[in-house]
Amino acid sequence: MPGSTTRPNGADAQPSPPPPDTLPAEPRVRRPHGLTGSRVRRSLALMGRGLRDEWRTYVLAIGSSAVFGVLTVAVSSAIGTVTDEVVVPALAGDEAARDRIWVAGLVLAGIAVTLAASVAARRIFAGNGYAALQARHRTAVTRQYLRLPMSWHRAHPAGQLLSNASSDVEAATGVFNPLPFALGVVVMIGVSAVMLFRIDVWLACAALVVIPVAVAVNIVFQRYMSPAITRAQQLRAEVADVAHESFEAALLVTSLGTADREESRFAARTDALRAANVRVGVVRAFFDPVIELLPSLGTLLVLGVGTVRLAAGGVEAGEIVTAAYLLTIMAVPVRAFGWVLGELPRGLVGYERISRVVDAGGVLAPGTGGLPGAGGLRVRLDGVGVDVRAAGRPVTLLDDVDLDLAPGATVAVVGSTGAGKTTLVSLLARLSDPTRGRVTLDGTDVRDVREGDLTAQVALVAQQAFVFEDTVRANVTLADEGHGPDDARVWDALRLARVADVVERLPEGLDAPLGERGANLSGGQRQRLAIARALVRRPRLLVLDDATSAVDPRVEQQILAGLRHEGADRPTVVMVAYRMASVALADVVVHVESGRVVDVGTHDELLARDAGYRDLATAYAREAERRAADEQDAADDEIRRHEQQEADATADLPEDELDRHEDEEADDVVRRAEAGALEE
Ligand SMILES: Nc1ncnc2c1ncn2[C@@H]1O[C@H](COP(=O)(O)OP(=O)(O)OP(=O)(O)O)[C@@H](O)[C@H]1O
Ligand SMILES: [Mg+2]
């Protein structure tokens, strides 16, 4: 919404809905993913949407299946014709018939080859369609994960998300395996029915009774199957969730020796899943044989009715045999529909679970405006409030926040734990939107800014630094090779974040691989890498949410001082900080308590007039002293323990690795000593 970014001040106190004209930024207004209506309607919609989404592939798959159906019926009459007109006369000595035997052979061979080709084609196309639909669902689900706000993610554990993108997608698409076959061979029901009616109406009715019976059986089946499947899918997600949590907490589990507890937690869920899957299997075990049995029951019925009709002179014995044969042909589609119907309950449950993600509200609609200009951004918050629902009750996390931060200023946000600092600073990068009021950057509401502009100009470094299992370069640029900033810029950022020396020491430099989650980096190194990642984008607003907690104070100060001397183009820096030495570097300090801004001013001003701030500052200083003393005490023990561990662990390490270990250890000791000295 360019050109109308400033709203009347009177609107500030109102929650601002996304302006309607930002919607065209979406490719098109999406229809809701979820299915509505009766079960039959939802089932038909599920299959219809899949077929429509991949219609080209399914036309070919169903077409191939129909060819198979027609040829299967054709084979019977072809064999009959060949037997009557070629084989029998040839055996009787008819010369002309003997000459035609090779023609008959060719016809039969042609049919057989076409039959085989139709089976292959159907399997290939059906397989393609199935894989394409899975890819579609997975993309839709993961795209939505990336667009949903953090509040949604907090309420949905990672294991559930993994399960939505894996087992729920598989469940939702399972029905598309038998579907093309079933739809293609419907033609067999048609052909057999016509032939049956041509023989005798009563025989045909007896044969076709199997179809309503199959429907009735399915209704009963669905009634039992749906709850069983719903529970199994939910438990599958829970198992994934527990497993994911255990892996994530590997360090904690090992260090606190709670492996047994984790194991029994996991075992409880898997046992429940086993029971649920057995239940699903039992229901299916009743359904499948009944469906398989139906054609045989149909044959019995045809023979029974046939006997009566034969006695009444309505049909001949041969016609009853033909009718019984037609029933075996009809059994193929009946079975195929049985498979489809058997998969449908699972499909519906999977689809509904995916839909809950795809239809989840709260996606932050991106704006269409830009953020022109250069240099630090002016940040304003006007009457900002944030409410969330927790345990069904509304909770106010931020209220009545007014701030005006000058471009290029370094701003420290200080407050006790749970005061609302993270909530406040995450609004600046639009990780969520305020419930009331507005956040503006250079006068433009963040809700009106194009997504690309916002991410390019505002960089947030979170409390937890995440490192991808990739090279140093890729972790800093977060771009594919050749698409991101060049190496010179990467080195600049690394230097500014005071992590260049660590990378220089790695034999592969920028190409050095970092283990999963940066396992081969220390906590402080990971944080510095995360800062470099933000700096390489040359943001105009840098938000550091306690992003230097694991960095020693000397380096933290170097980083902050480096940012302040970036020249005229220096970014506005908003940092959540705990160390008074760092807070003192800020131009402005914002004191937040219980979701409200208590005071804004310089460190000295706040010390002089804000009693709460003074308490906080004293507490931080005391905490720093205590930590320094503890660290000094622990340092000797630590070194001794390290020496012992190193002696065990490095016995067979290569030499350069050994050097690196020694360097790191020396760094560590120096860092601890410096930390103590500085904080005191
Ligand atoms: N989605 C949520 N639902 C309910 N409460 C929340 C939610 N997010 C945050 N909170 C609560 O809001 C308060 C502020 O959280 P926030 O993370 O902003 O604190 P903080 O000042 O950054 O704390 P810390 O210094 O520990 O990082 C906390 O009491 C927290 O429990
Ligand atoms: Mg926080």
Image (cartoon, grey):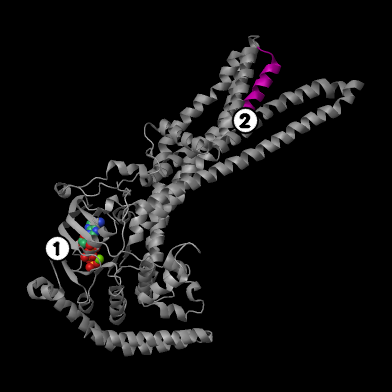
Q: Is residue 656 above or below residue 402?
A: below
Mark number for residue 464?
A: none
Given the image, on which type of amino acid does mark 2 rest? Answer: Ala
User: How busy is the neighbourhood of tag 1: few (under 14 within 10 Å), some, or many (20 plus)?
Assistant: many
- Name the residue that disc number 1 marks: 597
Horizontally, residue 430 falls left or right of residue 120, namely left
Task: Residue 242 in the image: state x and y as whole percent.
Answer: 38, 59
Q: Quadrant of ligand 1?
A: bottom left
Task: Residue 98 in the image: state x and y as whole percent.
Answer: 89, 25
Horizontally, residue 302 falls left or right of residue 37, namely right
Q: Is residue 538 above or below residue 672?
A: above
* Residue 475 in which image quadrant: bottom left
Residue found 18% across the figure and 61% down from its top: 404
- Give the SS element for disc 1: strand
Mark number for residue 66?
A: 2
Task: Residue 221 in the image: state x and y as whole percent.
Answer: 45, 35
Residue 321 painted magenta: yes
* Residue 205 in which image quadrant: top right
Task: Residue 308 in the image: state x and y as whole percent.
Answer: 61, 14
Residue 376 painted magenta: no
- In this view, the residue in front, 308 or 515, is 515
Main SS, magenta region, reads: helix
Q: CA distance from mark 1 to mark 2?
A: 71 Å
Given the image, on which type of amino acid does mark 1 rest? Answer: Val
Q: Is residue 272 visible?
A: no
Magenta stretch: give its range.
315-329
